[in-house]
Image: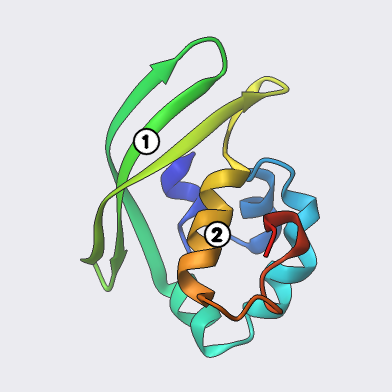
Amino acid sequence: MWQRFFNGAVPIPSRLELLQNGQMFASFVHSQAKTSLGSLVLAASAKVSAVRLQPPDHASVTYSILLGGKPVAKHLSGTAVYTAGRWQVAVTTFCALVHVAYGKKSSLIPAACGS
């Protein structure tokens, strides 16, 4: 699930299904896909190196983000949540990545992530 979420070849609607409350971020993701940063995101992938279950409904995920098959960010920590019978990337993980990517450009950060 994690690697599919970060796979730029997977259509955006399918990726949003893998994000906790993904529809809250649909307009942001679609609009940013057309930017230079968005095109980099769509070209990126992820490799999971560890998953630690935290019952009943969370998992800690250690992963790297790859660009062109080469790591650009290693040993990142994220959270997966088990909701409605499936695992999804936690909103907290998605928002943390958005904050790193956009820095102080708070006007671009979705309201659901806070400012």
Q: Which residue is mark 1?
A: 61
Q: Is residue 84 visible?
A: yes
Q: Nearer the viewer, residue 34 or 57?
A: 57
Q: Residue at x 77, y 62 (%)?
A: 111
Dot placed on the residue nearer the N-terminal end, 1 or 2: 2
- Please identify the quarter of the rendering in which residue 30 is found: bottom right
Whether residue 9 can be seen here: no
Residue 49 image point, x, y percent = 24, 39
Query: How many residues crowd mark 1 within 10 Å: few (<14), some (14–19), many (20+)?
Result: many
The image shows residue 10 at horizontal and vertical percentages of: 55, 59
Q: Residues within 10 Å of mark 2 (few under 14, many from 20)?
A: few
Q: Which residue is label 2 attached to? A: 10
For the point 65% across and 75% down, which residue is it?
106
Query: Three-letter amino acid code at disc 1?
Result: Val
Which quadrant is home to the C terminus?
Answer: bottom right
Q: Is residue 48 left or right of residue 58?
A: left
Q: Are marks 1 and 2 in contact (CB under 8 Å)?
A: no
Front position in the image: 31 or 76: 76
Q: CA distance from mark 1 to mark 2?
A: 20 Å
User: Residue 89: which quarter of the image?
Assistant: top right
- Residues 17 and 62: in front is 62
